[in-house]
Amino acid sequence: MTQTLGAAHPTPPTVGQIEKLSFKQRRYTKAKQSQRLAAAWMVTPAVALLLVFVIIPIVLTFALAFTNAKLISPTGPQFVGIDNFSRLFGDPVFWKSLRNTLIFTIFVVPLQAGLALVLALLINVRIRGVNFFRTVYFLPVVTSMVVISLLWKFMYQPNGLINGFLAVFGIDGPDWLGNPNTALVAVLIMSIWQAVGFHMVIWLSGLQTIPQDMYEAGAIDGASNWQRFRYLTWPALRQTRTFILITITIQAFALFTQIQVMTQGGPLDSTSTIVYQAVRTGFSLQQTGYASALSLVFFVLVLVVSLAQRYLTRDKDVKK
């Protein structure tokens, strides 16, 4: 009976089978085993990192969410059932944090994606000096968010640069970060400005994959610029659009650094977010169990929104 190596054998052959093979077949079998061993060695570091930094923390979060664990405590964690979740849904700070997170996400996703698309369309041309603008627009992305948050914090001061600019036009600027009505707006504007360059590059990469033949055919048919964008560019950017929307949404839900540096959740919890509240509860208040419950709710929220967004942006033309 003729034996076929490789794909026909999902498991390595036995010693008896190897003895029956010819010299070429045995050398081929050893080569395949060496490849599998090398592949296992290359995959091992990635699997170990995935376990240590992703899988184990997620499992611990699920487990600690049902305990009264504290960061520093002489007694170990005890099982308390759903007490953390009952306390969570009765906590007014949680509802404020959830509201602020949703408001931030609702505004930042369309504004940041739209502005990035406009910038990508403007620089998707072959003229002298366009690389300068690409670099300028991308510059905030490579700057530390902590540094940017500190700079904007100074700019938002009552006697800062922004209010000084408004005063030129006779406008009395508010205390941006000290007023509950303007603090979240100030963080929103800064966040859009900081990340728009990154998504501009993603949009630009999508634009440059569109064949120029489509635009030439559209021009021959007399299509206007808007019609070419509406019926050629926008449908061709479907995959890019989905990636950007999901990416911005997840980043918006994970809002933390700007809040930590600029407002510490204030004033009056007007800028507190779920991630900020979880970190503050877990480290400052040392209530690890309650912080795990917050993180678990945040995980479920992001998962539901991402699945809904993925479903709404799916390719309806692809048959199951």
Image (cartoon, rainbow, N blue to C red):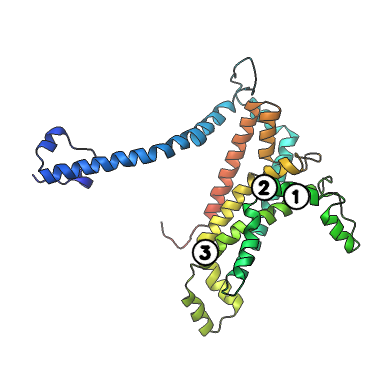
Nearest to N terminus: mark 3 or mark 1: 1
Quarter of the image for the N terminus: give it.
Answer: top left
**Residue 121 appearing in the image:** no
Work out how far the residue at label 3 is from the one at label 1, CA to CA, in angstroms: 32 Å
User: Please, what secondary structure does the residue beneath circle 3 have?
Assistant: helix
Quarter of the image for the C terminus: give it.
Answer: bottom left
Image quadrant assignment for residue 164: bottom right
How far from the left and from the top, in percent, is residue 18?
Answer: 13, 37
| Kind of residue sitting beneath label 3 | Gly
Q: Name the residue under label 2.
A: 145
User: Please, what secondary structure does the residue beneath circle 1 have?
Assistant: helix
User: Crowding at label 2, few (<14), some or many (≥20) Cα neighbours within 10 Å?
Assistant: some
Q: From the viewer's perspective, is the residue at label 3 or at label 2 nearer?
A: 2
For this rendering, which residue is in front, 168 or 10? Answer: 168
**Residue 14 appearing in the image:** yes
User: Crowding at label 1, few (<14), some or many (≥20) Cα neighbours within 10 Å?
Assistant: few
Placement of 191 over or under 298, stated as above or below: below
| Kind of residue sitting beneath label 2 | Met
Work out how far the residue at label 3 is from the one at label 2, CA to CA, in angstroms: 26 Å
| Kind of residue sitting beneath label 1 | Leu
Q: Do the residues labelled 3 and 1 touch (CB within 8 Å)?
A: no
How far from the left and from the top, in percent, is residue 319?
Answer: 41, 59
In the drawing, what numbered circle is on residue 124? none
Q: Are marks 2 and 1 in contact (CB under 8 Å)?
A: no
Left or right side of 108 for 25? left
How far from the left and from the top, in percent, is residue 42?
Answer: 37, 41
Residue at (44% x, 34% y) in the render:
48
For this rendering, which residue is in front, 155 or 104? Answer: 155
Residue at (56% x, 74% y) in the render:
126
Q: Mark 3 points at which residue?
A: 206
In the drawing, what numbered circle is on residue 151? 1
